[in-house]
Image: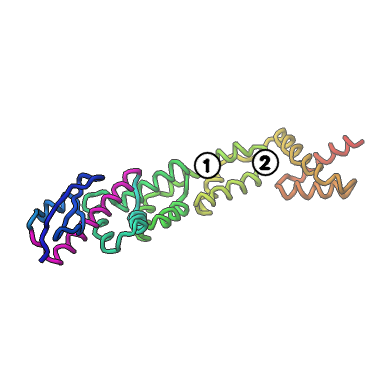
Amino acid sequence: MPIITKITQGKNNPERYNIYLEEKFAFSVDESILIRYQLTKGKELDQWTIEEMNFEDEVRKAFNKALSYLSFRMRSESEVRTKLKEKEFGEAVIDEAVKKLYTLNFLDDRAFSEALMQTQIKSSKKGPRAIQQDMQKKGIDKRMQKDVLDSYSEEEQLEVARGLAEKIAAKEKMKTPSQIQQKINESLMRKGYSYSLIQQAIDGLALEKEEDEWDDIVAAQGDKLWRKYSSKLTGYDLKSKVKQGLYQKGFPSEVINGYLEKKEQEDD
């Protein structure tokens, strides 16, 4: 069996040691491996022990890489595994490193999922479907996704969705109620809320317009349509096109007719 003929401390990392067998450099190990296996000059090493030490040393390297990766923020197990694969660690080494991370509570997919959900609710106001997609991207198990998302109650979803709907309604006040509803629908759908919950959020809003509000809104949108078509159309055809456009935007007939009458008076 080969004999350790020299041990030197690493120059770049003093916690690592270079092991020489029969006067030739053989491998390097972490200080903890040196102590664990009682490596000293003159000690004989069989091939099995050498392979075992090298494996443990690789696991420790992978563990330290993972700790560095986790130091910036929480990560999922899938993210950690992907990172270690990028660093070219083997599957068996990664398995052992991940197991150690779980044992020492550095890795916890459930805690990660719960934190991810709360962050997405508070910062991005997301609904369960969008959050589930985020969890999927992070490699979270489907059953765990469901367990965590079950804690996002419908009451809480409705509260967040209503807050978003109110902001949209306030921002789009120069739009018709149907336009505002469409905008809320599209925005909340993208945020990951269900259709039925979106309807509940909309039902709680006061979107109806007063007469003077209609005048301002139809003037703004009607004039825009008038400018758009007046270069190609005139007279009856122009008014018909504008009327059609306003109707599609959700303006009541009496509001549209009132607007067109004013345009006729302006032309006179």
Q: Residues within 10 Å of mark 1 (few under 14, many from 20)?
A: some
Q: Position of residue 197 (x, y in %)?
A: 50, 50
Main SS, magenta region, reads helix
Farthest front residue?
23
Residue at the outermost top position: 212
From the image, tell me which residue sits under label 1.
164
- Residue corresponding to mark 2: 175
- Kind of residue at disc 1: Leu
- Is 221 left or right of 105, judged from the image as shown? right
**Residue plotted at (67% across, 41% down):** 175
- The residue depicted at 23 percent of the width and 53 percent of the height is 60
**Relative to the observer, which residue lies in front, 116 or 146?**
116
Question: Which quadrant of the figure has residue 92?
Answer: bottom left
Mark 2: secondary structure? loop
Residue 210 position, x and y percent, is 68, 35
Q: Secondary structure at mark 1?
A: helix
Asked whether 175 falls inside the magenta stretch, the response is: no
Spot occupied by residue 116 in the image (x, y as percentages of width and height): 39, 48
In percent of width and height, residue 194 lies at: 50, 54
Nearer to the camera, 33 or 77: 33
Q: Residue furthest right?
A: 268
Specify the segment rendered in magenta.
43-72
Residue pictured at 14% horizontal, 63% vertical: 49
In the figure, 213 relative to 186: above or below?
A: above
Quarter that holds the N terminus? bottom left
The quadrant of the picture occupied by the C terminus is top right
Q: Is residue 251 above or below residue 145?
A: above
Would you say the residues marked 2 and 1 are in contact, meaning their CB atoms lie under 8 Å apart?
no
Q: Residue at x 78, y 50 (%)?
A: 244
Residue 49 part of the magenta-drawn span? yes
